[in-house]
Image (cartoon, rainbow, N blue to C red):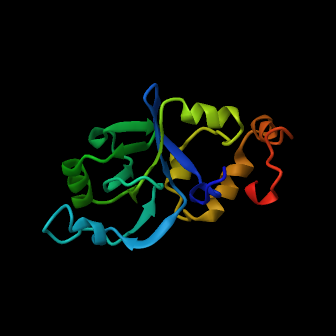
Amino acid sequence: MDDPHFEHAVILMIEHGDNGAMGLIINQPMETKVDEVWDQMSVLPCPVDQSLMRGGPCDGPLMLLHDRPQQAQIEVCRGVCFTADEPMVRELLAEDPGAMRYFVGYAGWGPGQLEDELNRGGWLVTQANADVVFDPDADDGLWMRVITGIDRSIAMLAMNPKLVPRDPSMN
């Protein structure tokens, strides 16, 4: 991908359908804390002292990945739930955080755009799991751990000479 936003990005796909796709980059922590965006949602003190993750280049509300299906808008995979609904976010933040990640921004694709990028070899795909999503070392090292865990046959597709850019900095 010729986009610095996605360099070594590990993206959890939240939704993917006929109207497009939406995902969160799960390995780009920010220095910004949750309380810096919390005051836009509530006059009460922020109940958590955690860093935000940059979910992608598209603007979006405070979003959570958590492990509580009963408070989820979307259950992404076993043990990983997504919530962006403001009252639900406030409720989740008021509870014991458990397994939880906090995001601003998201990665979005229009209809057919992600499929085109996949067909051109722009992404490697693997099954999501809670251990990766809630990895306490959510940084560039997570990308390497995910890449080394990808099935060899899938990784070999990305090595197709027709798909490898001529400019090595684009790899």
Residue visible at 28% across and 66% down in the picture? 37
Residue at the far left: name it.
43
Residue at the far top: name it.
18
Residue at the far right: name it.
161
Near-viewer residue (169 or 136): 169
Query: Looking at the picture, how far across and down is residue 29, in whole percent?
Result: 49, 66
Near-viewer residue (166 or 25): 166
Q: Is residue 133 above or below residue 162?
A: below
Q: Quadrant of the C terminus?
A: bottom right
Query: Looking at the picture, how far across and down is residue 167, in whole percent?
Result: 80, 56
In the rendered view, does 110 fall on the left or right side of 43?
right
* Tally of marks: 0
Query: Looking at the picture, how far across and down is residue 25, in whole percent?
Result: 51, 53
Residue visible at 71% across and 50% down in the picture? 147
Query: Looking at the picture, how far across and down is residue 73, in whole percent?
Result: 31, 38
Residue visible at 81% across and 45% down in the picture? 164
In the rendered view, does 156 fall on the left or right side of 71?
right
